[in-house]
Image (cartoon, grey):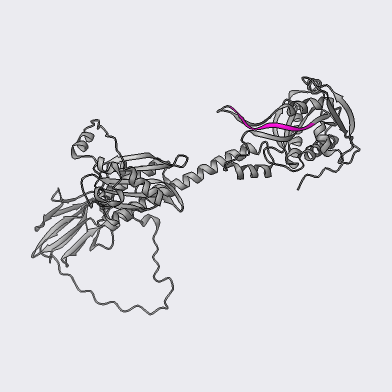
């Protein structure tokens, strides 16, 4: 029987007998001759006995099989031939140069109790096949198809090649930086294993219901491939897609195959099918659960019956993988937008108001849209701020304002109000916008009283050198325009109207630690607090007098102002 002598460098590793009609050589231990060579494919080559002769066959290896230093696909073997696989030399001898001794049977091992782990296989990660660590983006960039890469690793069958493609597409879905990369890999995979002339991935615009082409690919002719290899510019013709087929897939949420589109009764009304001479077509939805994101469409302009049910199943699997990534991107974008929205809202609205805004922000009526609302405005500032700021350092001034704003904001949030803006030393707050709030007039007045009490209390514990100050507040109720206003580059939630102007001027009629309220607010809360009537006052810019009522708060006052539940 013939023998193979395996050498690496000048060292003979082993000598084996070819004792079967089909003798395989490769990197996997399942081969008849296992080669510890990283340049060998998993099933690299095979020696077949044909009558009394032996022939060497390369199995589509990545690095090729060499016979007497010449790369071969298949070649008869003769005595003394030198086969090279990677860094390994194998000498073929027609007759065995040694006698194979029959080893004595070893004594049977002592019987041991069976373990539930006897059948377990444990492999270190370094022992796993390199095929699982291939970078599919590098494969495509090199101009090699994914199917070729699969065969280079020894994957010859259609089933194993398709598994290889879906495995690497799944990796791309999880690790690709962009959706465009996933689409490119997905379409390249389609053309690797499906006999398509043209293909496109179309994304569904949910606002208009129209399919928008995202990626289009066509199979190049041999001349175009050569021109491309020579660096010549290839003119890309416009690819027209059958809307009759794609609309049916989107509407009915089905995967579709037509073997002869021109005579398929389902598409007799399709003008594009006849106009563009479409013979065979496959179209599947990009779907994830109930969400349809678009379609993958491929066709063949020359052949009828160009596609099989296996092709349809594979295309459906590829589309589903791509749709999973699209769903992930959609959810990630939603989370990013929600995080950005939440971060902006939390600066101006209480946490529960933020939750209500986010809950309703995806609906037809966004709470932040501009609309008329009846609201209560609270305006507060520091009395004699200009004079005070001249007496202290800028650092002290900043520390004082920060503490003041922190105290005011916390209390406004407690009473379900929203901070619209800080203006110098003043705070403008709104109750009953953007979310409806029951008893918003009472909440605004209670918040005003508690602000005065909180500032008085905090100043008791301040060090002697800390500046002392008093506040005054104006509260007014009426109709305003409220909502997001601004430019494309900067937008903010604002309240606009005369009610706001009156609130800002009312606090000028409040003395130290007093709350001045307008008549509309007073009528709603007059039974809850002890008011003093100031009477009609003439506000700047107003023709009519405005009735003003005041609440004076001293450190000795104990007024219960519990926030709403």
361 within the magenta span:
no
Magenta-colored segment: predominant secondary structure: strand
Q: Is residue 131 above or below residue 505?
A: below
Kindly identify the residue that appears in the image at 35 percent across and 53 percent down.
255
Res 139 seen here: yes
Q: How many marks?
A: 0
Res 133 seen here: no
Q: In the rendering, at what x and y percent does residue 336 appear?
A: 54, 41
Name the one closer to the observer, 229 or 394: 229
Q: In the rendering, at what x and y percent does residue 492 appear?
A: 63, 31
Q: In the rendering, at what x and y percent does residue 197 appear?
A: 25, 44
Q: Is residue 190 above or below residue 26?
A: above
Classify residue 460 by image quadrant.
top right
View extreme (front): residue = 269
View extreme (right): residue = 556
Kindly identify the residue that appears in the image at 38 percent across and 53 percent down.
254
Classify residue 551 by image quadrant.
top right
Q: Is residue 281 above or below residue 429?
A: below
Question: Could you tell whether 525 is left or right of 406 in the image?
Answer: right
Name the one closer to the observer, 36 or 465: 465
Kindly identify the residue that appears in the image at 65 percent across and 42 percent down.
354
Q: Is residue 40 above or below residue 237?
A: below
Instruction: Assign the N terminus to one quadrant of the image.
Output: bottom left
Classify residue 108 by image quadrant.
bottom left
Question: Could you tell whether 317 is left or right of 80 in the image?
Answer: right
Which segment did they paint magenta?
475-486
Q: In the rendering, at what x and y percent does residue 453 appear?
A: 84, 37
481 within the magenta span:
yes
């Amino acid at each position: 029987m013939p023998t193979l002598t395996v050498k690496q460098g000048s060292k003979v590793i082993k000598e084996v007998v070819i004792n079967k009609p089909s003798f395989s050589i490769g990197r996997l231990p399942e081969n008849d001759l296992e080669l510890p060579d990283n340049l060998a494919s998993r099933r690299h080559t095979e020696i077949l006995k044909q009558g009394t002769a032996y022939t060497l066959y390369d199995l589509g290896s990545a690095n090729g099989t060499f016979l007497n230093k010449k790369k071969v696909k298949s070649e008869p073997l003769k005595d003394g031939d030198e086969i090279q696989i990677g860094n390994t030399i194998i000498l073929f001898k027609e007759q065995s140069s040694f006698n194979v001794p029959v080893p004595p049977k070893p004594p049977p091992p002592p019987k041991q109790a069976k373990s539930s782990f006897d059948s377990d296989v444990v492999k270190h990660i370094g022992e796993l096949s390199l095929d699982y660590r291939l970078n599919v983006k590098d494969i495509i960039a090199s101009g090699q198809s994914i199917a070729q890469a699969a065969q280079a690793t020894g994957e010859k069958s259609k089933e194993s090649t398709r598994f290889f493609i879906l495995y690497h597409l799944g990796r791309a879905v999880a690790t690709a930086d962009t959706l465009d990369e996933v689409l490119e890999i997905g379409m390249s995979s389609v053309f690797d294993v499906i006999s398509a002339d043209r293909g496109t991935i179309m994304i569904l615009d949910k606002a208009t219901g129209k399919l928008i082409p995202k990626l289009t690919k066509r199979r190049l002719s041999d001349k175009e491939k050569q021109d491309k290899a020579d660096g010549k510019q290839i003119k890309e013709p416009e690819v027209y897609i059958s809307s009759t087929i794609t609309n049916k897939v989107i509407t009915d949420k089905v995967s579709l195959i037509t073997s002869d589109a021109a005579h398929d009764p389902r598409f007799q009304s399709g003008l594009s099918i006849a106009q563009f001479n479409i013979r065979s077509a496959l179209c599947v939805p990009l779907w994830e659960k109930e969400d349809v994101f678009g379609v993958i469409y491929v066709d063949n302009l020359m052949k009828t019956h160009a596609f099989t049910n296996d092709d349809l199943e594979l295309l459906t699997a590829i589309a589903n993988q791509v749709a999973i990534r699209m769903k992930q991107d959609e959810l990630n974008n939603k989370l990013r937008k929600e995080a950005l929205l939440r971060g902006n809202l939390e600066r101006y609205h209480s946490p529960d108001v933020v939750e209500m805004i986010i809950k309703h922000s995806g609906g037809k009526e966004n709470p932040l849209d501009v609309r008329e609302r009846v609201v209560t405005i609270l305006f507060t500032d520091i009395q004699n701020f200009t004079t005070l700021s001249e007496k202290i350092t800028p650092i002290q001034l900043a520390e004082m304002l920060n503490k003041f704003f922190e105290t005011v904001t916390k209390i406004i949030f407690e009473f379900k109000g929203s901070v619209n803006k800080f203006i110098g030393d003043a705070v403008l707050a709104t109750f009953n916008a953007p979310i409806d709030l029951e008893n918003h007039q009472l909440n605004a007045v209670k918040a005003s009283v508690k602000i005065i009490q909180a500032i008085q209390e905090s100043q008791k514990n301040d060090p002697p050198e800390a500046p002392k100050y008093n506040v005054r507040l104006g509260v007014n109720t009426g109709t305003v325009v409220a909502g997001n206003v601004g430019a494309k580059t900067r937008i903010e939630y604002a309240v606009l109207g005369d009610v706001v102007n009156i609130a800002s001027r009312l606090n000028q009629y409040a003395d130290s630690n007093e709350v001045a309220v307008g008549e509309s607010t007073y009528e709603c809360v007059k039974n809850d607090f002890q008011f003093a009537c100031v009477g009609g006052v003439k506000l700047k810019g107003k023709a009519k007098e405005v009735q003003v009522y005041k609440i004076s708060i001293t450190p000795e006052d104990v007024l219960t102002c519990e926030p709403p539940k």
